[in-house]
Image: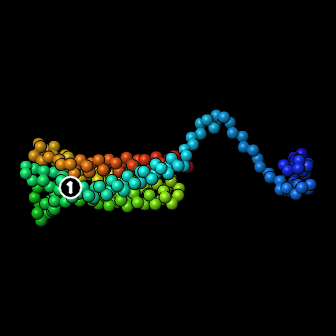
Amino acid sequence: MSTCSNCHAPLPGSARFCTACGTEVLTTTPVAVTYAELNTATIVPASTNIKSGRISSRTIAIAGLLLCLLFFSPFVSCGARTWTGAQAFQDSLPNRYEDPKDGILLILLPIAGLAGIVVGLVAMNRVEAGRSLSTLRTLGVVALLITLLAACPLSIVLIDINRSDGAFTLEWGFWASVLAMLAMGWSAVRLLGVRKDAG
């Protein structure tokens, strides 16, 4: 027979309150957990997930902003002339079509940059609002797709430079854009990792 936790008076099996002192009878079933189960359980502190999500989302937004700004920085040069990404895009339009020929694809960089800013800001809002970090998986996938979108024109420029036997040289704006793209991809993968760690 069970006893009251307050006055230790005997309690009938169906009692909800102690007949002696009136204390409510708590009916809890103990859960048996073995040492092996506790040892193999992976516990990730919520603060770690929040910090990782915050850093990753901010990095995506900053990388997106850099892709937009670097579009107007020196990208390629040939002889005495240097093109920014925007100039290379304008000179490659069908009505002008001057060198460099594939500069029209560079318009994908600011488009990817704007999309990255939006995804980063949405992810930051979700982290700061305390919403479930598992919802960041979708944003991580979108950020990966944006990274692939930015990688397309950068890889085509690199391939064309190699084909031209060094006629064009790549400027600092190109390499900075590559670093911004890699930072965005790394942060997108980290967002996917946060989702796995957060239950």
Quarter of the figure with the N terminus:
top right
Name which residue lies at 51% across and 47% down.
48
Q: Is residue 11 above or below residue 38?
A: below
- Determine if residue 155 is in view: no
Specify the quadrant of the image occupied by residue 139: bottom left
Q: Is residue 142 above or below residue 34?
A: below
Residue 42 percent across, percent down from the top left: 56, 40
Residue 110 percent across, percent down from the top left: 27, 59
The image shows a total of numbered marks equal to: 1
Q: Residue furthest top?
A: 36
- Determine if residue 178 is in view: yes
Residue at the disc numbered 1? 73
Q: Is residue 185 above or below residue 89?
A: above
* Horizontal arrangement in the rendering, residue 170 relative to residue 125 (left or right): left
| Front position in the image: 184 or 72 | 72
* Horizontal arrangement in the rendering, residue 19 relative to residue 104 (left or right): right
Dot 1 falls on a residue whose secondary structure is: loop
